[in-house]
Image (cartoon, grey):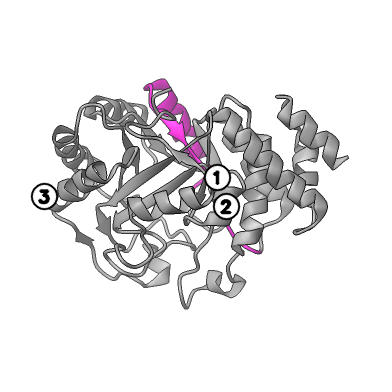
Amino acid sequence: MIKEIIRKSLNGATLVKEEIASLFSVPLFSEESSMIIAASRKKSETASRGTAEVHAQVGLNVAPCPKNCAFCSFAVRNKVFSETREISRQEAIKKAKQFETDGANAIYVMSTADYPFEKFIDISGDIRKKLHPETILVANVGDFSKDQAGQLKDTGFSGIYHAVRLGEGRDTTIRVETRLETLENARQAGLILGTCVEPVGNEHSVEELVEKTIITRDAKPVYSGSARRIPIPNTKMAEYGVVSEARMAHILAVVRLALNYAIPGNCTHEPNVIGAAAGANLLWAEAGSNPRDTEQETEGKRGMTVMDCVRVLHEAEWKVTQGPSKFFSA
């Protein structure tokens, strides 16, 4: 049965939820799991014409965020950051320009969910002006209205990163419907979507993985994929431990097989060779704040550089795109 599901995916047919669940349920390190991973790599190579990308994110601030996502270092409940701290406008521009110089295929600007939207637009506008016109700029912010989506587009953003997270509405105070409304607002404004099945923990069921996988597919993004949760020390989530990179390779492979060929990108985070070998053709470098880090500046800590990510992709035998992102340029 697994062979037939894999063949169906590679032939371009859309998998139904029962078939996706069957793939998620295959035991790790089994012959069938190896087949899933091999098929994922093949489908990723076909969908992206054999190329991979490195995107880079600049985090503008750390703050005790009232959205209180249990898996996030910014959450008030996790007591990591007791006060708001922001990098300067000049520092944000410097970090973005360095990523551009280093060869990132797209640059993301990220803030906490409660960061003033007008300030985000203002600083992002200055970043946009200092980058090459062809450089792809992507917003990673909280939920936003139709009008705000238009402002993001007018500021020069090509797209957004946004996700309905695992545990949304349970481990967060954000409604699933709110996240979906933001996706629709972005689509109507002409913003291209990148998303992901994240953050994966050991406690998540096959049913929830399937649900979130289908949500990402239905959103018609330019990439989906899967990323594991990095536990914040001394929190409830830390009790569940960390999903291994080996298991994540199987999970991201199943997500790739559930995606259609029209979706060229398959991401994973944090960057790792086994994930890239299994079909992840998008990795991220990071600077500034990071919701998985307890340090204000993630460089040299959890955050990797563009060249770090390029090395991971090369180790996994990927050819890395040169110049602006082909995913967001589609």
Side of 181 where 170 appears, left or right: right
* Secondary structure of residue under mark 2: helix
Give, as a three-letter code, the residue at label 3: Gln
**Count the marks: how many?**
3
Q: Of the numbered discs in the image, which one, if any, rests on residue 172?
A: none
Q: CA distance from mark 2 to mark 1?
A: 6 Å
* Secondary structure of residue under mark 3: helix
Q: CA distance from mark 3 to mark 2?
A: 35 Å
Give, as a three-letter code, the residue at label 1: Ala
Quadrant housing the N terminus = top right
Q: Position of residue 133 (x, y in %)?
A: 21, 27
Q: Position of residue 66 (x, y in %)?
A: 37, 58
Q: Nearer the viewer, residue 21 or 166?
A: 21
Q: Residue farthest to the right?
A: 1
Going 41% across and 28% down the picture, which residue do you hit?
A: 326
Q: Which residue is mark 2?
A: 275
Q: Which residue is mark 1?
A: 280
Chain part drawn in magenta? 174-202
Side of 257 where 125 appears, left or right: left
> Which badge, 3 or 2, comes first in the chain's sequence?
3
